[in-house]
Amino acid sequence: MKKYKLILFSTLSLLITPVYANDNAEQLFNERCAACHSINDNSHITLRERLQEKAPTLYYAGNKFNRAWLQTWLAAPSKIRPGGYSFFNNVNVTDEGDVIDESKITTHIAVNSTLAALLTDYLMAQTPKSDLIALEKVTLGKINRSLGSKDFNKFKGCGSCHQDEEGYGGVSGPQLYESIQRLQPEFIASYTRNPEAWDPKTLMPNRHLNDNSIKKLLNYLNVISQ
Ligand code: HEC
Ligand code: HEC
């Protein structure tokens, strides 16, 4: 038994310390990331499977993230979803509101800057949804902050699931107070317009917003991300 363990251990060490050349970002992803993240079309999965997923899909990463943000984040990750991806396992519903069980929120693995650059190139090449992005024409502008906040929280109800300020707002969706740094504006517009087009099992409701409403929301996200 002891000998077997030793052999297994040496084999594992060989597996996790290869030198990564430029063309094996895919291998790197499969070894380090694929245990949690899907990279292929997962839109056909059932709701049950969707709720069991450990991490967000990276299937359309190249249509979603800003390259500079992605590369920096992979080397020094920070929280994106206050309640984690499986917020329903990590959040206790109480009379005082949703309380996050912080002991269940794990820190994301970090990679060194060379691997971050390699993985960024690989992920930014995943662009199966370019047709949806091409439908959006976004020019970021400004909006009065308190009017924007009222629109986001009170009229459109986004704040019941998303934070527009650190520690303030809902926890079932990703925080949005730094979304303009993190996400391509056309992705934000497209996901807000039609969440199911990106994720058929999304828990985000489609509010059938018109172009003007979407523009106002983007301008607000722009103002709060400064
Ligand atoms: C143990 C599981 C696990 C592993 C392994 C893992 N991740 Fe993650 N990843 C997560 C979770 C959970 C989140 C959501 C974090 C959050 O929202 O705060 C996440 C978020 C991300 C995001 C942001 C996705 C989004 O839609 O917001 C990227 C990009 C990412 N991971 C890339 C990677 C890469 C590249 C690797 C391999 C080097 C990797 N991850 C390995 C669990 C994992
Ligand atoms: C009932 C809860 C709920 C409401 C209300 C809601 N969302 Fe969402 N939203 C979600 C969830 C859940 C996701 C996807 C979660 C994930 O990938 O982890 C999401 C994703 C997003 C994303 C993509 C962010 C990313 O990092 O992947 C954007 C942008 C977004 N929502 C904007 C909005 C806006 C703008 C509104 C108001 C019009 C809104 N949402 C209302 C729950 C909600």
Image (cartoon, grey):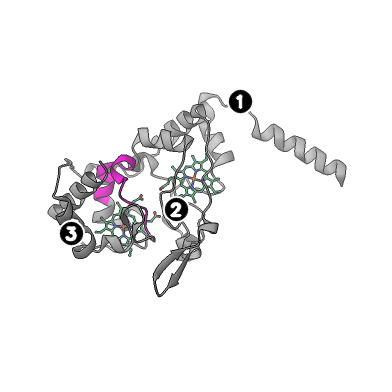
Per the rendered image, the range of residues in magenta is: 173-190
Check residue 178 for magenta coloring. Answer: yes
- In front: mark 1 or mark 3? 3
- Indicate which disc residue 42 carries: 2
Q: Whole-percent x and y of residue 24?
A: 54, 29
**Left or right of 133: which side holds 69?**
right
Find the distance from the CA under tag 2 to the CA under tag 1.
Answer: 30 Å
Work out which quarter of the rendered image holds the C terminus and state it. Answer: top left
Residue 118 x %, y %:
48, 29
Dot 2 falls on a residue whose secondary structure is: loop
| Res. 18 image quadrant | top right
Amino acid at circle 3: Asp
Relative to residue 140, is residue 36 drawn left or right? right
Tell me whether the residue at label 2 lies in contact with that at label 1, contact meaning CB atoms closer than 8 angstroms: no
In the displayed structure, 208 sits above or below 4; it is below
* Image spot of residue 48 (x, y percent): 49, 65
SS at mark 1 in the image: loop
User: N-terminal of the two: label 2 or label 1?
Assistant: 1
Crowding at mark 2 (Cα within 10 Å: few <14, some 14-19, many 20+):
some
